[in-house]
Image (cartoon, grey):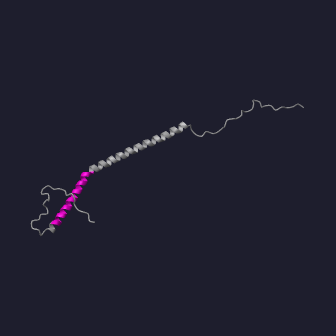
Amino acid sequence: MALSQDLPPKGGYAPIQWKRNLPSRGFRPGIYFAIVTGICGYGFYKLIAGIRERNELARERQWGRIYLMPLLEAEADRDAYRRITSLRAKEQEVMADVADFDATKSVYNDPKFRKPAVIGFPKF
């Protein structure tokens, strides 16, 4: 009987895999850096736009207050005038018995109206 010897298959054996076959763990580091840089850049852009918007709103609010100031001062002057005339009427009523008392006479001896520094004191 003839001795049969094992021989390699026709075309040879498949190559031996000696390298590790690990799947890719994501993008290259440069791509991650580019993505993070883009996100941070967009965030800074929105931050600066928000700061500019806030500054514009503050400027608009300030100019609105400046434009309202004459109206508010006129309202305060009308209120002070009502209080002063009310106080003069009460003073005239209280001092009715005094002969030569005039509640409308200015204490400054000046015909020009001067706004008093203190209209009234708070009650404690």
Q: Residue furthest top?
A: 11
Most extreme residue toward the right is 1
| Place of residue 96 in the rendered image (x, y in percent of width and height, measured from the top left) | 13, 68
Q: Main secondary structure of the magenta part?
A: helix
Quarter of the figure with residue 27 = top right
Q: Is residue 21 left or right of residue 39?
A: right
The residue lying at 40 percent from left, 43 percent from top is: 49
- How far from the left and from the top, in percent, is residue 4? 85, 32
Number of numbered markers: 0
Q: Is residue 84 covered in magenta?
A: yes
Q: Position of residue 39 (x, y in %)?
A: 48, 41
In the rendered structure, the answer to whether residue 122 lies left or right of residue 89 reads right
Name the residue located 37 percent from the left edge and 47 percent from the top edge: 54
| Position of 93 relative to 69 (above/below) | below
Image quarter where the N terminus lies is: top right
> Between 29 and 64, which is closer to the camera in this rendering?
29
The residue lying furthest to the bottom in this view is 97
Is residue 86 toward the left or the right of residue 13 in the image? left
Quadrant the C terminus occupies: bottom left
Magenta range: 68-91
> Which residue is located at x 24 percent, y 54 percent?
73
Name the outermost residue toward the front: 124
Q: Residue at x 24, y 51 (%)?
A: 70
Q: Does the magenta-highlighted stretch encompass residue 79? A: yes
